[in-house]
């Protein structure tokens, strides 16, 4: 029951574990939100207004000139949900047709599974196709797939917190739990490196097109989050490892003292002589 569960929080180790886990999630969110919000208020808001004005003027110009015979596929544009594979596949085909006459470089079709997973940022053609039809750069809207990956990361970490709290509260064998913490630390480190090197972009062009600057990328939030998960898991791995070692050492000393005391009492009984009547 809930009441019985709250009793476990009297243990300072359980309370420290849960609070530290919550901090490891909250701090990256606060830091990321404040940094991207600062850039948006300083620069991004004005840039967004300029883009909206430019898009409106282009739309007015297209209507005045007539866009029926310009060879574009604007009338076929549709804003697809991330899970709608068929819609994204069709939009990619339209985007490739619309940009087929640009440049002399031969175009290479990207696999459709990549288009589905990567979203609107998966190709330059899709980014241009979306911007021309909505006035909104694809990079400003984020990737639903990346947002889902971040949400699943939070769910996974919440499960780790719950499992750890139960293990610590019920005084279970910590050997397996320490191994689990070591693997979690390694997993968080690997994902932090992947997020920083592959998911997060350092291209100046991408930064110029972003309303939120470099910090506006979801990859930055994921990097922060994995960094704090790594620090959290690594710190408790060391702390609980030391605690387990000291407990085993204390138990070993108690057993040794108990055995010595028992031997002493047995020896005393053997040397005792009954009085002569």
Image (cartoon, helix red, strand yellow):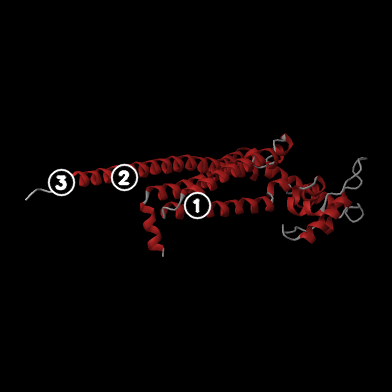
Could you tell me how far apart the alpha carbons at marks 3 and 1 are, in whole angstroms? 62 Å
The residue tagged 2 is 259
Given residues 211 and 91, the one toward you in this image is 91
Could you tell me how far apart the alpha carbons at marks 2 and 3 are, in whole angstroms? 24 Å
The residue tagged 3 is 273
Secondary element under disc 2, as helix, strand or loop, is helix
Marks 1, 2: nearer the viewer: 2
Q: Residues within 10 Å of mark 3 (few under 14, many from 20)?
A: few
The answer to whether mark 1 and mark 2 are in CB contact below 8 A is: no
The residue tagged 1 is 161
Marks 3, 1: nearer the viewer: 3
Secondary element under disc 3, as helix, strand or loop, is loop
Nearer-N-terminus badge (1/2):
1
Secondary element under disc 1, as helix, strand or loop, is helix
Residue found farthest to the bottom: 1
Find residue 162 and report its horizontal and vertical position in percent: 49, 55
Q: Which mark, by number, is residue 80?
A: none
């Amino acid at each position: 029951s809930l009441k019985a569960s709250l009793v476990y929080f009297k243990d300072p180790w359980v309370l420290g574990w849960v609070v530290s886990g919550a901090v490891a999630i909250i701090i990256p969110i606060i830091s990321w939100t404040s940094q991207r919000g600062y850039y948006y208020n300083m620069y991004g808001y004005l840039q967004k207004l300029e883009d909206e004005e430019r898009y409106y003027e282009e739309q007015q110009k297209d209507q005045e000139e007539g866009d029926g015979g310009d060879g574009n596929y604007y009338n076929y544009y549709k804003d697809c949900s991330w899970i709608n594979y068929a819609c994204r596949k069709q939009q990619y085909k339209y985007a490739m047709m619309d940009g087929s006459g640009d440049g002399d470089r031969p175009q290479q079709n990207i696999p459709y599974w990549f288009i589905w997973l990567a979203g609107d940022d998966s190709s330059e053609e899709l980014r241009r196709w979306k911007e021309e039809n909505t006035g909104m750069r694809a990079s400003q809207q984020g990737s639903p797939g990346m947002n889902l990956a971040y949400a699943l990361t939070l769910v996974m970490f919440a499960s780790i917190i719950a499992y750890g709290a139960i293990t610590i509260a019920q005084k279970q064998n910590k050997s397996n739990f320490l191994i689990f913490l070591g693997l979690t630390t390694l997993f968080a480190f690997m994902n932090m490196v992947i997020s920083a090197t592959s998911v997060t972009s350092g291209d100046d062009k991408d930064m110029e097109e972003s309303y939120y600057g470099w910090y506006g990328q979801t990859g930055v939030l994921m990097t922060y989050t994995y960094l704090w998960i790594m620090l959290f898991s690594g710190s408790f791995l060391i702390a609980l490892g030391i605690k387990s070692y000291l407990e085993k050492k204390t138990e070993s000393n108690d057993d040794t003292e108990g055995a010595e005391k028992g031997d002493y009492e047995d020896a005393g009984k053997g040397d005792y002589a009954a009085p002569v009547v």
